[in-house]
Amino acid sequence: MITATGVMDNEEIYRAYSTELTRYATGLVGPFDAQDVVTDACLRAFESKTWSEVVDRRAYLYRTVFSVANDHHRRTLSRRLREIKVAEPEGFEVSSPDLDVLRAVSRLSVQQRSAVYLTYWEDLTPDAAGDRMGISEGSVKRHLARARKRLGELLS
Amino acid sequence: MNDEKRFRDMMRRLVAMSPEAPDFPEETIMAKHTPSKPRPNPVLMFAAGAALVAAVMIPVFLISRGDAPVGVGTTTTTTAPSTTTAPDTATTTTQATTTTVPDNTSSTQPVESVWSRPVFLYQTPANSFLGNPALVPVWLELTDTGGTLSPDDEFTAALAVLGTELPELPASSGLANAVPAEVQIISLTTATQGADQSWVADMNEAFLAGAGGLLADVTMLNQLIYTITDNTLGSVLFTVNGQPVEAFGSEGIVLTDPVDRETFIEHLAPIFLTTPVIDGEDGYTVAGKANVFEASLSVQVLDGSGGVVHEEHLMASCGSGCWGEFSVDLDPGLITPGESSVRLFTYSAEDGSMTNVLTVPIPADSGVWEITVG
């Protein structure tokens, strides 16, 4: 059972990190579902039996957001974009650069999105990004190289 | 605009679309952790019990007298389904309590999805005394254009590939797969046992039969263990129907405890790879583990006709009876994707011949195996 004190602790942690976690989730699944991913991830973390023993809770929450995004919302961004396209009035051309970005991002795997976000938004080294993602530095570099290749084709 | 500026600009525009953080899910948490139910009022309990006794005994009394009341039907007794005991682990599951997005399955149109991750195959090295297989990971980019793979899970996708003939691999690649096509991962969760955390891979029953023979069984396990543990946790507990596996494969291997990359390492070839050979930021990285004489091994780059265009000597971190790690970055200029291959081997101390020879082809797309299904 979570005590009143425990709830407050979790709430404080949530208030401290939820904004940056939402930005990270936006990088992983797009803006439409970022809030749901953050909520699901925090619930998963708070209910984990090992949560009370976690030393670096920020890093743990990042990994959980990554895991939730990876598990449940991989397909959502491309579906959202398709729904937007279907909802457009006839003759209306989508020219928003943001939609262009979302389309490009939707062609990446979640791991590639995470590597790009952590490297080019958070300015983390491949080693530190690997810690966040729970993968090796070499795998981060591979994801970046692959993302660069895919996005180079899409954004050029 | 160079790549870095393009990436930074893209992230800036993406983050600019980020919504505000959602509210703290206090109500959900409190609902899940509501204190135990209030104790029932003893007076009401007594009254309810008395009413129940009356409801049962009056018809029985009337039936025993032979004048069953109209409207009293026969009572059938049903047995509650037996409950399955969960393994003694604390399993983490996802509670999507606030999701407002319709479920993927409600979509009527197929949606493209992309997976990218290493998948471990194997190759039997040439001129090897032991004949044990060597693991060779390939970097898989699998695009599912028609929603073919379900559930939406990268490990299912990886297994789907492990269980196929890998049509994108050239027959000359020498790579093979010991995981039978019918083996599936039903779910993959994390669990805590004591102070340790591990993956829990719940497999279908086809898993229990193994791959046919001890060496094939262990190779199948090594492929699965290395593929699953490429992320975060280092060990895997295999279960079937939620129960630990007490007998696996032809030899009845006991898998009731988590297994890791070291558990069956002695069944692997003296040289094997732990990362895919693809064009990363440092060139083509060739990295793996070796247990070879004096920790000494060599790497060659071969051109499309098998000619040696580059060779260098490597030292593993341990050797002559212990497993050591090795890694080397090869200049991309040495390699023509789709034609070149990388060869790892040791020179025989007896006659100088190449032994334990592992030859890894480099696929056309920078070493990445791109597969499309759907």
Image: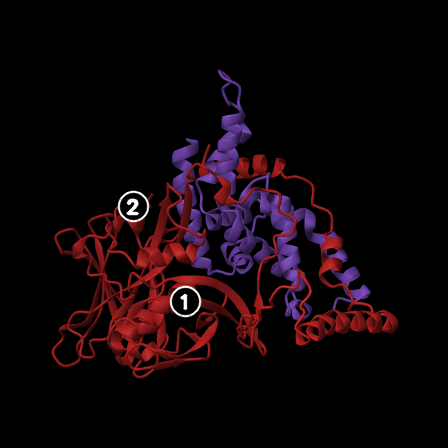
Report the mark closest to the observer, 1 or 2.
1
Place residue B112 in its image quadrant.
Answer: top left
Helix, strand or loop at mark 2: loop
Q: Against A77, is B216 above or below?
A: below
Look at mark 2 in the image and give the residue it sits on.
B365
x and y percentages locating residue B362 in the rendered image? 25, 53
Mark 1 and mark 2 lie on one chain; the one further toward the N terminus is 1
Visible residue check, residue B231: no
x and y percentages locating residue B7 in the rendered image? 50, 39
Considering every residue shown, the one lying at the far right of the view is B43
Q: Against B242, is A125 above or below?
A: above
Give the numbered dot on residue B69.
none
Query: In the image, B157: left or right of A50?
Result: left
For the residue carrying disc 2, how many other residues have a C-alpha within 10 Å: few (<14), some (14-19), or many (20+)?
some
Q: Colour of chain B?
A: red
Of the residues shown, which amino acid type is indicated by label 1?
Met
**B64, A82: nearer the viewer:** B64
Look at mark 1 in the image and give the residue it sits on.
B203
Place residue B294 in its image quadrant.
Answer: bottom left
* Quadrant in which the C terminus of chain B is drawn: top left
Q: Colour of chain A?
A: purple
Helix, strand or loop at mark 1: strand
Number of marks in picture: 2
Q: Against B187, is B57 above or below?
A: below
The chain ID associated with circle 1 is B
- The residues tagged by marks 1 and 2 sit, at their Cα atoms, a distance apart of 33 Å
Q: Residue at x 53, y 29 (%)?
A: A84
Q: Residue at x 59, y 53 (%)?
A: A65
**A120, A75: nearer the viewer:** A75
Query: In the image, B247: left or right of B106?
Result: left
For the residue carrying disc 1, how many other residues have a C-alpha within 10 Å: few (<14), some (14-19), or many (20+)?
many
Of the residues shown, which amino acid type is indicated by label 2?
Asp
